[in-house]
Image (spheres, grey):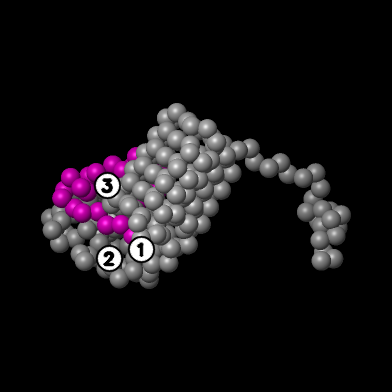
Amino acid sequence: MKPIILFGTGKIAEIMLYFLRNESDRTVAACTVDRAYMPGAEWQGLPVVAFEELAATYPPDQYEVFVALGYQDMNELRAGKCAAARALGYTLASYVHPQSGVPKDLVHGDNCFIMNHVMIHPCVKLGSNVFVWSGAMIGHHSTIGDNVWLTSSANVSGVVTVGANTFLAVNSTIGHGVKIGQRCFIGANALVTQCTEDDQVFVSASTKPFRLSSQQFMRMSRFADL
């Protein structure tokens, strides 16, 4: 397998670098960002090259690229950099953790990241540039579109379609058979049981603080006696 060039020098790139170095047999040769965002000549022990000069320094016939960016602009930033790398002739690598527990029939595109301890049923299809974090669940016969981000403990029931560039936050839940439009934001603890349009936002109100202080509550509840 070809060595990987990591696009990014932020927190997501740091997580991806950890997994590639410690939980894979892949080699990371360097990292790249747009020239205006270069942190210097080196990052995490890797050489940093401007993306504008990447093909001349690390030719696409000898290296693959993984775009390790977040979900800024409803995943458009990451999607755009994937497209730019493909246009230069690079193959985009995907990473599936060896302890992910994914079924053998899982279909996924390029630049996908599937962390350890996910719950993905058989008969699931993931598009390209899909990130699935630990604890996320995707039910049987569901289809996840391109550039989607599922945070830890996001729940997608069976026979669900999630449109491109959608973001699912921690503990969000999509009901059985629901179709989610493109570029939707499903917030933490939100429950969606009906099909959505494109560009919709679903958020759940934060739990209100109790009227007692934590010390008063502990005395009243007698938790300290347990």
- Check residue 93 for magenta coloring: yes
Q: Residue 169, relative to residue 23: is it above or below?
A: above
Residue 133 appears in the rendering: no
State the residue at coordinates (20%, 47%): 86
Q: CA distance from mark 2 to mark 1?
A: 8 Å
Q: Relative to 103, is 4 on the left or the right?
A: left
Q: Position of residue 176 (x, y in %)?
A: 51, 41
**Mark 3 Cα within 10 Å, few/some/many (few <14, many 20+)?**
many
Residue that label 1 marks: 17
**Callout 2–callout 1 Cβ contact below 8 Å:** yes
Looking at the picture, which amino acid does disc 1 mark?
Leu
Q: Earlier in the sequence, mark 1 or mark 3?
A: 1
Q: Relative to 99, is 66 on the left or the right?
A: left
Q: Earlier in the sequence, mark 2 or mark 1?
A: 1
Q: Dot 3 lies on which element?
A: helix
- Numbered disc total: 3
In-front residue for pair 80/163: 163
- Check residue 106 for magenta coloring: no
Which label was assigned to residue 28? 2
Highlighted magenta segment, given as a residue range: 68-95
Q: Position of residue 77 (x, y in %)?
A: 33, 42
Q: CA distance from mark 3 to mark 2?
A: 17 Å
